[in-house]
Amino acid sequence: MKEQIIELLKQGRKLEAVATAHRLGGGTLLQAKRYVDAVERETLNGNSPDDNDRVVRSWSVKYDGGKPVSITLRDQHGERQLVEGTLEWNAILAEITQTRNERDTTTDVKGKRWRFSWWSKRNQERMANANTSTPSKWKFYLPFGLALVLFFGFITFLTDCTYGYVGLLRQAVMSLIMFLITYAGYLLAIEKKEKWYSRLWGVVICCASCVFGGALGIALVKDLCTDSLKVYQGEVKVHHNTGRGATRYTVEWAGDDSHWWTEHGITRSIYQEMQGYKKARVEYWQNSGVVKRIQPL
């Protein structure tokens, strides 16, 4: 490995030498750079170089939305544009990331007496990925698309599944849909964009779906873990609402003590059975509003 590094140094390709030492020798990028510096000092001292051999290398990086789009390198060969994905390109990005991480680590140590190592490692990996790879759009489209499929599937095909224990299962899936939308909104909110207000849609989606999904989940947990099954006996009204190709059947009664946002769904067969009856005995879960059983009187 040392011979390769010496050969690269003789050609004035120090960045590639650092990348080679990092790849072959393992360890951190800083350790590889220190090793190359030591080899360079040893080589220069042995060869007694003159002032023309001491070339100052510098570069400038242009970013577009947090992603590097061009790197200009200046060395003994002059000024040139690097090709994305080459060893020199990756070595410069890696050195920038390493320098930034060291600066952040020094700042954190001075400003805080404690820090979570796993959180620091996660931030370093995220910064490295932001510098060396394109954003993964599937992380947003996958949960959002799955949520849309489940949501429209329930709205279109499973409107008759709001009764009994199946209704509780349906509410659990609706909570899952809301949390998938929350995650998608979170990814949209943290996406790097030039204008900060372009991420407000993600913040709104994340907050709204989180609140609604949390309300559904809390109501479901209360019904499953507490004695919230209520019984009403008296006059009831059954309704059916048709819209966008789907029909919903519901029941309501005076003095309903469920949450204002709940809806007491029933099946089509129960709706037909209740025709001609004005009174019924209704068993329902108070928090979620799901009807467990209804008997006409």
Image (tube, rainbow, N blue to C red):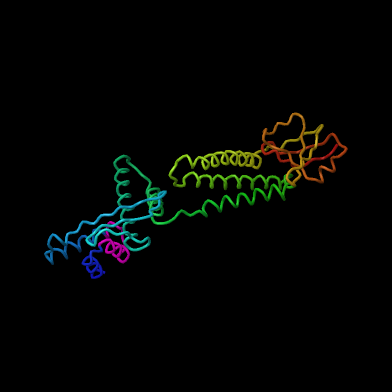
- Magenta residues span 14-32
Q: Residue at x 67, y 35 (%)?
A: 261
In the image, taking residue 228 as reference, residue 194 lies left or right, namely: left
Q: Position of residue 76 (x, y in %)?
A: 22, 61
Magenta span dominant secondary structure: helix
Q: Residue at x 70, y 31 (%)?
A: 257
Q: Position of residue 142 (x, y in %)?
A: 56, 53
Residue 133 or 283: which is nearer the viewer? 133
In the image, taking residue 86 as reference, residue 179 lies left or right, namely: right
Residue 212 or 290: which is nearer the viewer? 212
Is residue 69 part of the magenta span, yes or no? Answer: no
Q: Position of residue 254 (x, y in %)?
A: 77, 29
Residue 235 or 35: which is nearer the viewer? 35
Q: Position of residue 211 (x, y in %)?
A: 57, 38
Q: Residue at x 13, y 67 (%)?
A: 47
Is residue 17 part of the magenta span, yes or no? Answer: yes
Q: Residue at x 20, y 61 (%)?
A: 38
- Quadrant of image for the C terminus: top right
